[in-house]
């Protein structure tokens, strides 16, 4: 089983992209939760959508629940060829209602973080 464990540089880049996407002043305001999706065909669930879907738009999945940021930072199982696709909800630290302030998604290819994107902004991408 191939796993991806983000480096401190990866973590900083994701959190900065989330700050920019949510238009927060400081990275310290960002709270991220990783979405867990369920395959509409098989019923399987995963925070790495690439394990349960080949659809780049996730149309054959539905949001199941959320996992804490630590579920990502501890390491994520990848596909056999080292792919990953994850989506994070952005919330503001200290917000009692925990309103949604946006999303960022990441792409992992051959075990390396390659893309960080919001909507419609791509914060980091290598063109793969």
Image: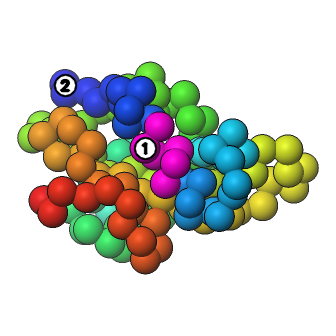
Point 28% across, 30% down: residue: 4
Tell me the tag on residue 21: none
In the image, residue 50 sits, relative to residue 1, either above or below, namely below
Q: Can residue 40 be seen in this view?
A: no
Instruction: Please tell me which residue lies in front, 18 or 4.
Output: 18
Taking the image as shown, residue 80 lies to the left or right of residue 102, namely left
Residue 71 locus on image (x, y percent): 50, 30
Point 63% across, 44% down: residue: 27
Location of residue 56 by image quarter: bottom left
Point 32% across, 72% down: residue: 57
Q: Can residue 71 be seen in this view?
A: yes
Instruction: Kindly state the secondary structure of the residue where label 2 is placed.
Output: loop
Stretch in magenta: 12-17
Point 15% across, 63% down: residue: 127
In the image, residue 97 sits, relative to residue 56, either above or below, namely above
Location of residue 74 by image quarter: top left
The residue indicated by pointer 1 is: 13
Instruction: Kindly state the secondary structure of the residue where label 1 is placed.
Output: helix
Q: Which residue reaches farthest left? A: 81
Residue 54 locus on image (x, y percent): 21, 62
Q: Residues within 10 Å of mark 1 (few under 14, many from 20)?
A: some
- Decide: marks 2, 1 in contact (CB < 8 A)? no
Q: How crowded is mark 2: few (under 14 residues within 10 Å), some or many (20 or more)?
A: few
C-alpha gap between disc 2 and disc 1:
26 Å
Instruction: Please tell me which residue lies in front, 123 or 113.
Output: 123
The residue indicated by pointer 2 is: 1
């Amino acid at each position: 089983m191939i796993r991806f464990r983000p480096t401190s540089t990866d973590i900083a880049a994701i959190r900065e992209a989330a700050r920019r996407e949510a238009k927060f002043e400081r990275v310290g305001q960002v709270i991220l939760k990783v979405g867990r999706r369920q395959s509409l065909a098989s019923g399987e669930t995963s925070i790495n959508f690439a394990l349960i879907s080949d659809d780049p738009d996730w149309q054959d999945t539905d949001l199941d629940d959320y996992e804490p940021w630590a579920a990502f930072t501890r390491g994520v199982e990848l596909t056999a060829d080292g792919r990953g696709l994850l989506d994070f909800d952005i919330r503001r630290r200290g917000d009692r209602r925990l309103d949604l302030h946006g999303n960022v998604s990441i792409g992992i290819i051959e075990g390396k973080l390659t893309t960080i994107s919001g909507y419609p902004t791509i914060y980091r991408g290598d063109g793969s």
